[in-house]
Image (tube, coloured by chain):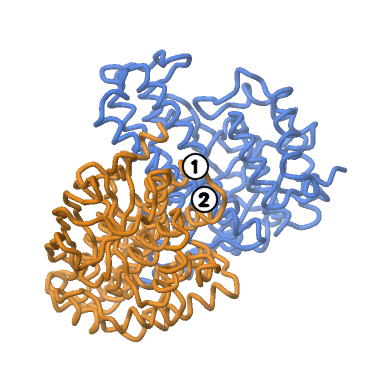
Chain colours: A orange, B blue
Amino acid sequence: MEDISLQSRIDVLSEEQVMIQDSAVAFIAQDEELKKVRESRFTQPGYDAQTWAEMAEAGWLGFLVPEEYDGIGLSFSDLSLVLIQLGKGLVPAPFSATAVLAARTIVKSDNESFKKARLPALISGEWKPAIAWQEARATLDVKAEKVTCADGKLNGQKLFVPDAGGADAFIVSAASSEGTVLYMIEKDASGLSIEYAQRVDGGFYATLTFDNVVAGEEVASAAVAEQALASALDEARVAASAELLGVMTRALEITVDYLTQRVQFDKPIGSFQSLQHKAVDLFVLSEISRSVLLQTTALFDGDASDKERAIAASQLKSRCGDAALQITKDAIQLHGGIGYTDECNIGLYLKKAMYLSSLWGNPTAHRGRYASLVL
Amino acid sequence: MTDYNAMADGDFRKMLCDWLVESYPDELRFPAERMHWDQCGDWYLTLAKKGWLAPGWPAEHGGMGLDANKLLILMEEFEGYGVGRTPDQGMTMIGPLLIQYGTEEQRQHYLPKILNGENIWCQGYSEPGAGSDLASLRTAAVRDGDEYVVNGHKIWTTLAMDANMIFTLVRTNKEGKKQQGITFLLIPLDTPGITVRGIDNLGMHDEFAEVFFDDVRVPVANVVGKENDGWTIAKALLGHERIFIGSPKMASLAMNRLKALAESAGMFEDPLFVERYTVLKLEIEDLSAAYMRFVEVLKRGGKIGAEVSMLKIWNTETQQRITDLMLDVAGENCGVSDAIPAGDTAVSAPGEFIGARPTTIYGGSNEIQRNILAKAVLKLPS
């Protein structure tokens, strides 16, 4: 599939970035027909273990982890090159949830021995933690209220934990007498029940219910937990946005290819002006999204404040979430009847966009936060 | 001669800014409409005297010789201070074209007259029957000895009534491909047989004109390039400075006026309004990210191609949506011509709304821009 983005026309990559991108392009080329993607749909854990092992092998899981914990310590600009390709390939692995949200929450926490013990295991792919923080629909607030920790026991409920089926343990935010604290809870802890909901893209969300679950190791104390979580979540939003950019650009590439091949009225339908203009509008939307991603990763690679990062993450997530939905919806329309069938791959892009655009705050929620921080 | 390109960006900015504060007339800041010569002629001559009239021209031809980066800074500072456009077709269009395609005689004759204000130029491309399909133009130039005899009708000629020179595309050959029978011709507007008539736009301002040619005799020496080669020359110039049409500055200014209007009407208490406002604000912020991405290309010394059309589409359509919301906020004042007080300023919502109409039409309509992107970037079939 030909890359129709403006990257090769107007952007400049370093030699190292070209290598990173090339390896990610080769990685997704292994499943160009999306056969593996289809095989893992609607089957726990929603992705295949081999894929995760290969990502660990490539070193990607340690991109955002400092070298002292066996990571590589690369930049968001570098990581986004991988994430865009993972989005293009619809790779069903909890990369942003584990290698970004979980890894970065741990990095920003204040339990040094936990970091030393666990981060190397996360990076090597042996140990997969999932962060359980959310207590309501469409919230961006990380303050724990409904899950409490008193007398060393957790009670309450966490919602929308992505890809919990393949996780080994949960890192759970809970309201203690000192404020929000992060605890590690093993998956088989007594009193923890896990209920799965199948997602449209083929993965699963989990609802975790805690009934007097004994609190495990404290990952982050009340002094840092909320800030660590909030900051890591903003990084995860950037990561999800990069995946969304991959989803939308590949959906557009597939659609432009279809417009060129499909013949009606004795002409390729891509010669009709109404379809050309629609395709152009989608292209513009994708390149606006890419521009915001480039600006945002550069900001995250610098020394911006938490507030500046929050503003930028919300700007980016609202743009990429909306753009990916718009592009994949119109991609279905431009495919006509075949686009509404499950056997046509374009629908897989729509469903991935539906999942990722709502994950960690949908566009409306992010515009709301943007407005409250900027206006 | 100052080497502006060697200056630190911050120093260059400060130099421009200080001088604008000192030299630009307060009453002309952020003009609501395109200024006529009787309003801005003095400013034109002030710029000329300072040597800053033609920032993009090479220094050897009397310009400032700015590189792409410094040129962008200058545009930003001028826009930010609210400096209105002069009748600037000489500097932006015909000057660069003569530098690239003119003869030595033409350069020596015309360039100094642009720089000293003696010649004010306007552009004669469009015709009543040749708009988006410009190559179908019919104004004819028929050779008669050392002269052409020109007959025809140009339209949408911005500020023709203030100009004394017009550069035109005229038909010199009716055979073959229509693009190949067009010649680039320079015509003094005081030549007998020329009539200029102003056209009021929807803002009730005579910004445009039409120009009629009735047996107008023009020396053959006034051709730029070769006979029948005009299309290539004009097209090369259309790419020039096209990035500026994507600058988010205009939309930002419109957004500021919307904000003033909305604050005075207490609209920020209304969550529905806040959502609509935030959507538009993000459209501009995101455009700004895209604009800077293109600016980086210029700063690296790279070339920008057809893809820059995306900025024009996004920018102008966002401006129109901003003024849509202004109308909504204005309520019944939508029907009032004069500006209404808004905080410590005054805003005319209908003026802004009407003023935003031509942005999606000029410089190649947005539909034409989409055709270009479909062909040149997405490679969709014909």
- Residue B209's disc number: none
Say which of A164 and A348 sits in front.
A164
Residue B211 seen in the current view: no
The residue carrying pointer 1 sits among few (fewer than 14), some (14 to 19) or many (20 or more) residues within 10 Å by Cα, namely many
Residue most toward the bottom? A30
Q: Position of residue B45 (x, y in %)?
A: 74, 29
Task: Assess whether mark 2 and mark 1 are in contact (beta carbons under 8 angstroms).
Answer: yes
Q: Position of residue B261 (x, y in %)?
A: 38, 21
Question: Residue shown at 22%/65% (left/top)?
Answer: A350
Q: From the top left corner, tell me how far across and down residue A294 is, in percent.
A: 49, 58
Q: How many marks?
A: 2
At mark 1, the secondary structure is loop
Q: Nearer the viewer, residue B344 or A101?
A: A101
Q: Tell me the kind of residue under disc 1.
A: Pro
For this orientation, the residue located farthest to the front is A151
Chain to which the residue tagged by mark 2 belongs: B
Q: Chain of mark 1?
A: B
Which quadrant would residue B2 be assigned to in this image? top right
Name the residue nearer the viewer: B155 or A158: A158
Residue under label 2: B291
Residue at the spot of label 1:
B248
| CA gap, disc 1 and disc 2 | 7 Å
Q: Amino acid at mark 2?
A: Tyr
Q: Residue at x 29, y 59 (%)?
A: A216
Q: Residues within 10 Å of mark 2 (few under 14, many from 20)?
A: many
